[in-house]
Image (cartoon, helix red, strand yellow):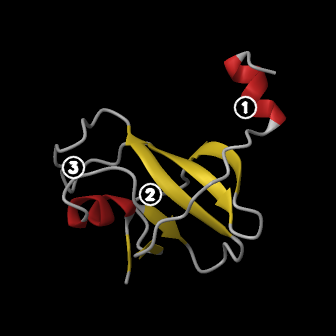
Amino acid sequence: MKTDVYSHYLGHTNQFGFWLTKPHWDNYVAQVLKIIGIKEGESVLPTEHPKVIALLLDKRTNEIEEIVELAEPEKPDYIKLNQDFAPNYILPEAIKKVLNVA
């Protein structure tokens, strides 16, 4: 079912960690890591549109591409996936540099 990220969060018992995709994301999925200003378990009010941080995964390689702020999380075109993905956790060089682990 397509809906906004916040509705998927509420439907996931107000827990982070669920996986999403969009129709035009062909080979990518995103795992919601954080909704800024919301503690896990708290509700998001319908009038709020906080930023959503997600891990972007390439399904072809199971590699993490980057950690991103989702564009327009209030738009009703996100699809919650009822499966878990197992990233291989090989971090991209750009993320390693930010974390100073390169």
Identify the amino acid type marked 2: Pro
Residue at the spot x=27%, y=51% of the render? Answer: 15
Find residue 87 and report its horizontal and vertical position in percent. Answer: 62, 54
Q: Quadrant of residue 92?
A: top right
Q: Are marks 2 and 3 in contact (CB under 8 Å)?
A: no
Name above or below for residue 49 compared with residue 84: above
Residue ID for mark 2: 73
Find residue 80 and report its horizontal and vertical position in percent. Answer: 41, 72
Q: Secondary structure at mark 3?
A: loop
Q: Is residue 51 left or right of residue 101?
A: left
Q: Earlier in the sequence, mark 2 or mark 3?
A: 3
From mark 2 to mark 3, how far is it between C-alphas?
12 Å
Find residue 44 and report its horizontal and vertical position in percent. Answer: 21, 49
Residue at the spot x=50%, y=55% of the render? Answer: 31
- Which dot marks residue 37? none
Q: Secondary structure at mark 2?
A: loop
From mark 3 to mark 1, how far is it between C-alphas?
29 Å
Q: Is residue 89 left or right of residue 45?
A: right
Quadrant into which the C terminus falls? top right
Residue ID for mark 3: 44
Residue ID for mark 1: 95
Residue at the spot x=24%, y=35% of the render? Answer: 39
Q: Secondary structure at mark 1?
A: helix
Q: Are marks 3 and 1 in contact (CB under 8 Å)?
A: no
Foreground: 75 or 42? 42
From mark 2 to mark 1, how far is it between C-alphas?
23 Å
Identify the amino acid type marked 3: Val
Q: Earlier in the sequence, mark 2 or mark 1?
A: 2
